[in-house]
Each structure stands twice: as C-alpha cells, then as structure tokens.
C-alpha cells in the first residue's frame, strides 16, 4: 500500500502466538498494544519509513497474470500460434489447444504432415479429439492436384468427435472418389458446412455432400458452379438415407452467374425449395456475388431476385433475419418479396450502384430498389435495418469535379423528388414502429481511376451526407438513422 505521504505500508505479520504479544507489526512500531487509533491511508503522522514485506517479481513478464497472456493468445491468427507455443511452457498449452481447435490444410505436404503426426503422436491425437473446425484450401494449387481431400474423411473418420465446422475452399471437384461421400457420414455431428469456389458435376453431388450431415444447421454456399444444369439435373432428389426431418437454420447463398453461363442459382434453389430443409430457416443471406452484379447480365440479376423470393416464401414466418443484394442495372426495378416473412426482425439490403453514371440517376435508382423490397415488408417485429450502398467511378461520368462543382453535383432539387422518393418515404412511415430502433446506412466508393486524396474524399463525403438525410428523411427525423463513415477503396 502507498499512503498519501508516499510512505509504503506493509501487511500485518503474525508471529507465534503469545498472550503478551501484539499481532501488530509495523516497521518502527514496537508498542505491545495496537495503535490507539485505526491506521488509515490518510494518516501522515508516521515519521519513520515503512518497508515492504516481500517483493514483486523482478521481470515484467512475471508480474502479468497468465490469464492476460491466454486472452492475447486467443486473439492470435492461426499462423502465429505455432510461434506462441514455443515461447515458454506456460504458453504452450493454450497456444497448442487453439492451434488444433481450428486445423487449416493448405497443401498436400501440409496434409501428409498432419496424417503422419496423427499416426505417431498420442498428444496430437488428443488435440485432434478437441478440434472444432477444419478448413481445406485449394487456391494455391491446381484443383486436379487436390486429391488428398478424397481421403481426408476416411483417414480422420473417428479422430474428430468434436468437429462442428467443415470448410472447403476451392478443393472440391467433380467426380470425387466414391469413398469420399461415404466417409463424410462419419462426421454426422457436423453443424456448419462452408463450400466456397468449388465446382461440382451437378446438383446431385451437392446433395450427397449436404445430406451426409443430418444434424447440419448452417449451410454456406459461395461461388458454387455446376457442370450440368439441365432440367433433369435441377430436379430435387431425396436420398434414401436422409431423414425427412432434416432442417437448416442458417443459409448463405451467393453464386456467380454471367451472360451465357448456366443458371446455377436456379438449379440449387429448385432443390432447396423442393425439399423440406429450408422450411425452418431463421437466417437467410442470398444474392449474386458483387463482381457478377457489376459485369453480369441484367436477365440473370432479375432471375436471381425471383429465385430468392421463392426461398423467402418457403421460409415463411420462421425467418427472423434476411440479407439480400440488389443491383441497380435491373429494369424494371427488381426486389425481394417479404410478404410471407411476418416475423422478420433484422433486414440488410445491399444496393450495388455500378455503371449507373450521373449522380441524379444513382440516387433515383437507389430509391427505386429500396422501395421494391421495403414496400413488401409486412412484419411488425422489425427491429433493425442495415442499408449498404456501393458506388464506383468506372465507366461513368462521375468525376471529382462533377461531384464538387460541376453540373453533376449531388444537390437535390424539387424536380428530383419524384414519385419514387415520395413512395419510398411513405413506406418508411409505414414501417416505423416502437420496435424499429436502429437504421444503419453504410457506404463504399470504389475508385477505378485512382484513389482520391483524404481532403478530396472528405469533401465528397460532406456532399453525400445531406443527400442521405433527405433520402431517409422519415427515419432521420425520428433519430433512428446512424450513418457510418464513408469508405473509399481501390476498385
């Protein structure tokens, strides 16, 4: 302890019991009786120096509680964990546990090393028994060389009882070895499956992978492509080993479709709608990938809204959260129909305003796209809405001069407040309720002609914010709109 006078107080020390001894022992105090008054930190009457009993550890690292280091280790990225495990014995257990909690396999060499350690080390076997997530990445080598994935479920079939998440990035290919699909059933306790940038023969192969996990609750599909997409391959087929009560809780579906390519989204949604696995969805995120929204065909984008609307109808009142992506190039304005989702609580809408051109056109199209979806909301439970607007300056008349001083400057006039704006404001008034307490507006500007300076970007931001206040005027007047900082990025 330190008193106000700067003196150090020691803790009381207790000697062997004696009827005549006092339990009080303070440096310089030899009285056989306790002090007549309580000793407090504000007492400045002590004229003798006070000393410590005991001392702090000499090094700073020994003074920091182990729990603090463990908290830091928990926040480390995966490549840093092997280094942390070698720092000292105290760190080794936590770093090793986290290292094997999520196992990343990024190459054939990496895979063979893991198999060898698994077969020769009982410690590694114990660590793998607590593994929660396996991530297989196939981006760093040709897919034809990623054949080690065929044997992974068979080799580790009984070694991963705690596995809950399985993520495959780019390594899944058409016509996997038959043992791969059969061995996947050993991971029947899996709860979450991520498939990203994988290519399959048809939707039946996708079904075989998904239906291997009867307890699956979350399915994430990004960039999945199919070799065959004819009508026969798009029909739903229920495997005989799959229980009818199979239900998903979370579904993420963002696919790539360009002009002339096969309708992957249609095939996959036909399967999902035709089965019963989406009947109890609580969280749905769907749309075309951002790059395809920019360069893709308008017909595909309009069809994507129709297919996702079928999923929304299938979910019905069980859906609590929806995240959809809209494109400004679709005419007439395409949106999602949320009429059947009467218990919706969270709504996120991304509007990609690519290749639109003039400033006035950007704002009008943003209003029309938002109206197309918001006008269909019937839920009285809506609590929060997030709107993400993305612009670009690629192939448009949008320049720094036009934004700040030119004729394209974003100054809204009464002529611009067309029926689209008024209709959108009417919908915002209707959607407002006591439960709607948060509307967040996020903005990203992609620059293909080079990033602006910080001063130029700030000047543009100051011109955009007043427009947002008018665009979301009914909610802004009620004080529930939060506008985040506008992000600028290289396109």
Image (cartoon, rainbow, N blue to C red):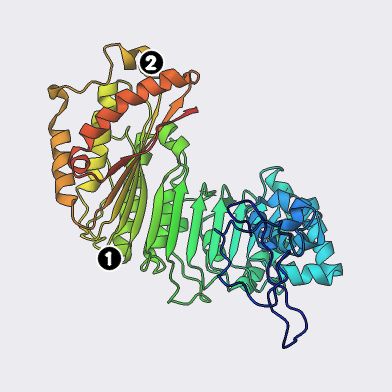
| Horizontal and vertical percent position of residue 41 | 57, 60
Q: Where on the picture, by quarter, is residue 344?
A: bottom left
| Horizontal and vertical percent position of residue 450 | 50, 19
Dot 1 lies on which element?
A: helix
Q: Are marks 1 and 2 in contact (CB under 8 Å)?
A: no
Q: From this viewpoint, which residue is outermost toward the right?
A: 120
Q: Where on the picture, by quarter, is residue 175?
A: bottom right
What residue would you read off at disc 1? Answer: 317
* Disc 1 versus disc 2: nearer the observer: 2
| Horizontal and vertical percent position of residue 30 | 73, 70
What residue would you read off at disc 2? Answer: 399
Q: Residue at (33%, 24%) from the top-left corner?
A: 462
Left or right: where 122 falls relative to 25: right
Could you tell me how far apart the alpha carbons at marks 1 and 2 are, in whole angstroms? Answer: 45 Å
| Residue 258 makes an appearance in the image | no
* Vertical placement of residue 88 versus 367, above or below: below
Q: Residue at (77%, 64%) from the top-left corner?
A: 54
Query: Badge 1: few (under 14), some or many (20 or more) residues near its Cα, within 10 Å?
Result: many
| Residue 455 makes an appearance in the image | yes
| Horizontal and vertical percent position of residue 393 | 41, 22
Decide which of 248, 387 is in the foreground and name it.
Answer: 387
């Amino acid at each position: 302890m330190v008193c106000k006078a700067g003196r150090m107080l020691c803790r009381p020390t207790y000697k062997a019991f004696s009827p005549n001894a006092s339990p009080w022992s303070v440096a310089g105090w030899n009285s056989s009786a306790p002090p007549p008054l309580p000793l407090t930190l504000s007492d400045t009457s002590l004229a003798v120096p006070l000393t410590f009993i005991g001392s702090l550890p000499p090094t700073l690292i020994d003074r920091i509680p182990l729990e603090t280091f463990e908290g830091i280790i928990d926040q480390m990225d995966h490549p840093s964990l092997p280094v942390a495990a070698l720092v000292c014995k105290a760190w080794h257990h936590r770093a090793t546990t986290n290292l094997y909690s999520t196992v990343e396999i990024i190459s054939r060499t990496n895979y063979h090393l893991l198999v060898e350690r698994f077969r020769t080390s009982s410690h590694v076997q114990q660590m793998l028994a607590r593994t929660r997530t396996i991530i297989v990445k196939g981006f760093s080598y040709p897919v034809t060389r990623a054949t080690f994935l065929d044997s992974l479920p068979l080799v580790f079939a009984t070694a991963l009882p705690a596995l809950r998440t399985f993520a495959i990035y780019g390594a899944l290919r058409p016509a996997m070895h038959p043992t791969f699909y059969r061995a996947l059933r050993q991971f029947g306790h899996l709860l979450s499956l991520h498939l990203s940038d994988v290519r399959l023969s048809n939707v039946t192969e996708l079904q075989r992978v998904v239906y291997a996990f009867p307890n699956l609750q979350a399915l994430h599909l990004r960039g999945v492509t199919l070799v065959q997409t004819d009508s026969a391959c798009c029909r739903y087929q229920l495997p005989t080993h799959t229980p009818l009560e199979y239900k998903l809780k979370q579904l993420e579906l963002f696919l790539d479709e360009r002009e002339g390519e096969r309708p992957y989204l249609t095939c996959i949604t036909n399967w999902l709608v035709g089965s019963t696995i989406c009947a109890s969805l609580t969280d749905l995120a769907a749309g075309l990938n951002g790059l395809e929204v920019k360069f893709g065909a308008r017909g595909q984008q309009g069809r994507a809204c129709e297919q996702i609307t079928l999923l929304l109808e299938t979910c019905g009142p069980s859906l609590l959260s929806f995240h959809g992506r809209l494109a400004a190039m679709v005419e007439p304005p395409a949106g999602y129909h949320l009429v059947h989702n009467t218990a919706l609580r969270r709504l996120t809408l991304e509007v990609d305003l690519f290749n639109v051109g003039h400033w006035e056109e950007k704002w009008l199209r943003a209003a029309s796209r938002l109206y197309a979806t918001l006008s269909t909301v019937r839920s009285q439970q809506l609590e929060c809405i997030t709107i993400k607007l993305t612009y670009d300056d690629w192939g448009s008349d949008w320049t720094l001069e036009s934004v700040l001083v030119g004729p394209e400057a974003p100054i809204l006039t009464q002529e611009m407040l067309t029926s689209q704006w008024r209709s959108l404001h009417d919908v915002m008034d209707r959607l407002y309720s006591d439960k709607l307490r948060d509307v967040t507006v996020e903005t990203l500007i992609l620059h293909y002609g080079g990033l602006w300076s910080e001063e130029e970007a700030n000047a543009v931001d100051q011109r955009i914010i007043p427009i947002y206040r008018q665009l979301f005027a009914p909610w802004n007047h009620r004080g529930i709109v939060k506008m985040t900082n506008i992000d600028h990025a290289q396109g």
